[in-house]
Image (spheres, grey):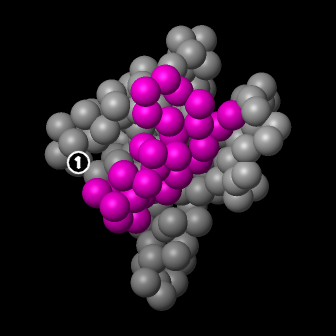
Amino acid sequence: MLIAEDEVLVRQVCHAVLAAEGYAILIAASGRGALEISRAFPGEIHLLLSDIRMPGMDGWQVRDILVTERPGIRVLLMSGNAEEPTDPRSFLRKPFLIDDLRDRVRHLLEGSAAAGAGKTDSQIPPWSHANS
């Protein structure tokens, strides 16, 4: 999982909560930093958790690039701006509850596993959080 968030406290909370759930986390303090980390990381990144409003390169731009460079990546965007037009299934409004963060991430990752090319539940391996 790759977290792109310019606010230190939000970044630390997201990391702590999701690491406690067993997810392997890559962290960037900016959109450009997220792209650099993604391009340098040879493994699979299952989810991008990104703030929408960041200086330099915003979350929309990061998302657009990463979904092209890493087909199949799931995206969860966050913002405190009530005017952000987003799909509610892939959006988390700040401030958020810790349980909402956990649930939304789990839902997105389980949804990507269940969408696996017509596989039945018994054929889909459980998510290995260490590979997220």
- Vertical side of 112 occupied by 33: above or below: above
Task: Using the rendered view, name the quadrant where residue 1 is placed.
Answer: top left
Badge 1 amino acid: Gly
The answer to whether residue 88 is above or below residue 15 is below
Find disc 1 in the rendering and name its residue.
43
Q: Position of residue 80 (x, y in %)?
A: 74, 29
Question: What is the x, y in percent for residue 32?
Answer: 34, 31
Q: Residue at x 65, y 53 (%)?
A: 90
Identity of the residue drawn at 43% across and 33% down: 57
Front residue (pair 8, 13): 8
Residue 77 placement: quadrant:
top right
Visible in this render: residue 4? yes
Determine the residue positioned at 51% across, 84% down: 120
Q: Which stretch is magenta?
A: 52-79
Q: Foreground residue, 96 or 68?
A: 68
The 10 Å Cα crowd at callout 1, few under 14, some 14 to 19, many 20 or more, is few
Residue at x 46%, y 61% (from the top left corner): 126
Is residue 38 inside the magenta stretch?
Answer: no
